[in-house]
Amino acid sequence: MSKAMKFTIIKACSWTLVGLFMVMIFSNPSTILEWGDNKTKTLLLAALFLFGYTADLTLMILEKTKRFGFKRDERDLYIQHKAMSFGYISTLIYVFSTAILLYTLYENKGAVPVGWLWFIAYSLVIVANLSMAVTALILYRKQGY
């Protein structure tokens, strides 16, 4: 298994944890309806995303150090390019379908609760990171890494 694949697995695991905890927070019915009234949930979500971005930053710093001997070749760059292309398209599809779903659910009520907009914003980061990481892992697996 290459180092690039190992780092991608770590990235996928860290963003999966963030996503699972985010879903647990938003699955509470009061989260969506009373978004602005609960600072604890807002701070908890901020801490989750701090964890995800800190994991990404740590992986990037480790890639740059000479101690680990991390080098990307043209195959890694190809896989990264393909994964980013797929991640971009899947992110667009996610935002469009979620927005349309919320519109149809709340069309008769006249407004979408602000908690759902925050859900889209937070989950968008998770969907983008996971779609790229999972696609890269699939492509690494096909290459025989």
Image (tube, rainbow, N blue to C red):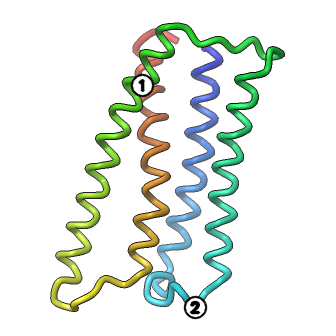
Residue 119 occupies quadrant: bottom left
Residue 79: percent from left, percent from top: 43, 19
Of residues 116 and 12, the one nearer the viewer is: 116
101 left or right, relative to 84: left
Of residues 85 and 33, the one nearer the viewer is: 85
Q: Residues within 10 Å of mark 2 (few under 14, many from 20)?
A: few
**Badge number at residue 11:** none
Q: Is residue 117 above or below residue 84?
A: below
Residue 83 occupies quadrant: top left
**Badge number at residue 138:** 1
Front of the two marks 1 and 2: 2
Identify the residue at image location x=69%, y=63%. Answer: 47
- Name the amino acid type tagged 2: Asp
Give the residue at the far right of this rendering: 67
Residue 48: percent from left, percent from top: 65, 60
- Name the amino acid type tagged 1: Ile
Residue 139: percent from left, percent from top: 41, 20
112 left or right, relative to 109: right
Identify the residue at image location x=21%, y=75%. Answer: 103
Identify the residue at image location x=57%, y=91%. Answer: 37
Identify the residue at image location x=65%, y=11%. Answer: 71
**Badge number at residue 37:** 2
